[in-house]
Image: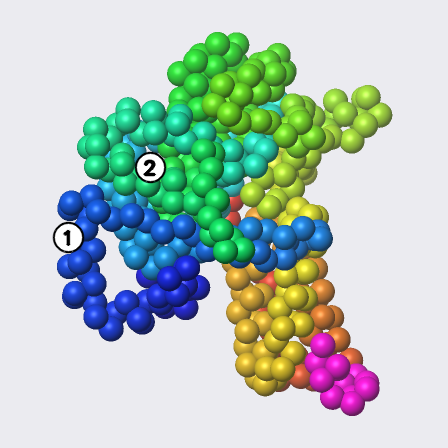
Amino acid sequence: MRKDAAAGIDKTTKDMYAENLDANLSNLVERLHRMAYIPQPVRRKYIPKPGSAKQRPLGIPCFEDKLVQAGLVRILESVYEQDFIEYSYGFRPSRSCHDALKALSETVENKPINHIVEADIKGFFDNVNQEWLMKFLAHRIEDKRIQRMVKRFLKAGVSEDGGVMVSDDGTPQGGFISPLLANIYLHYALDLWFEKIYRKSCTGFARLIRYADDFVVCFQYKPDAERFREELGKRLGKFGLEVEPTKTKAMEFGRFAVQNAKRRGERAETFDFLGFTHYCGIKRDGKGFRMKRMTARKKFIAKLQIFKEWLKKARNLKTKELWETAKAKLRGHYNYYGVTDNLRGIAQFGEEVKKLLFKWLNRRGKKNCLNWEKFSEMLKRFPLPKPRIRVSMFGFSVN
């Protein structure tokens, strides 16, 4: 459990729980055994949503609920990990966003892919139908006590403005168990349908690659892609889910997409997946097709906005502390977005961060006390992390 995590409605922190740890755990286990454990509502908190005026809701469970959820996740993972399809990557052990990106890269470049369906599920985590989720769970989990405990978490509700709201839809917000329950839901609602039914009806190669509720589907032939785009909405609709029509489309994408688009007097289409915009390119030697990627514009702007908001809050920190935290944030950005073909994207982000640091450090002293020349000298003495490619999209085997 994280030491610095925010407390739930009971205001109990990890340190407070640890003061009487043995007694607290004994009491918890005893209540679990006699099914007397009742999860508490999660505390609703809103944070600014980067790139818009909207607020993003967060759910903060109580510390003891986090413990129980962590235990449930271990049990459920041991059952479902052998069931989940190979190309499902979200919130699974030893799998990451970069693994999903590599699988997509290898599929598009090494398989006969000519069309992509980019899909988006509208408000997925808030619209999971709990009745369907419990039916899916009962397929593999016969233990009624585990079923009842999961249902209690689903019905625990959200505490906000002194009241508690309970819904028949959605998964527990902010908890360890929410991503796994979401994976179970989409395993039955989407993955198995695609693998066992839809893919077998295709006339050519087809592959679905999913990370949580974010997924793309690769096709060899256009009719298969367009039919999937139509049937996807019907399939998800059976389980209370909706496709976001403005963010879901079938497009030509692959080794012939650029030349075909040129013939029509158009530009080849692109698609976004896991924070990157993917586009058709060529190999470095000028021979042969390569799928390339760069930071999605929307994500680039949002990440800069997050850094700017942090600077506003951190302006009273000592310069050394502010500088070290800025370096850590830059490293985090480079670690995720520093993938093959995206050096320009992360270098541009680094330059924008430098400008923001210069601007805010200049505000701390007298007006214009720090000119760009002095700031450049500061960068030489205390350099920021250099942008470099940290994750290669090559060398990943896809069967």
In this rendering, the answer to whether 176 lies above or below 373 is above
Place residue 47 in its image quadrant. bottom right
Tell me residue 108's x, y (percent): 55, 30
Q: Residue furthest front?
A: 162
Q: Residue at position x 38%, y 40% from top?
A: 155
Tell me residue 153's x, y (percent): 35, 43
Tag 1: amino acid:
Glu
Quadrant of the frame with the N terminus: bottom left
In this rendering, the answer to whether 84 lies above or below 367 is above
Residue sitting nearer the eye, 53 or 75: 53
Q: Which mark is residue 30?
A: 1
Residue 144 left/right relative to 237: left
Tell me residue 287's x, y (percent): 65, 34
Q: Which residues are magenta?
A: 360-371
The tag earlier along the polypeptide, 1 or 2, is 1
* Disc 2 crowd, CA 10 A, few/some/many (<14, 14-19, 20+): some
Q: Residue at position x 27%, y 44% from top?
A: 72
Residue 355 left/right relative to 20: right
Tell me the SS state at disc 2: helix
Q: Residue at position x 15%, y 46% from top?
A: 33
Q: Which mark is residue 151?
A: 2
Residue 347 left/right relative to 238: right
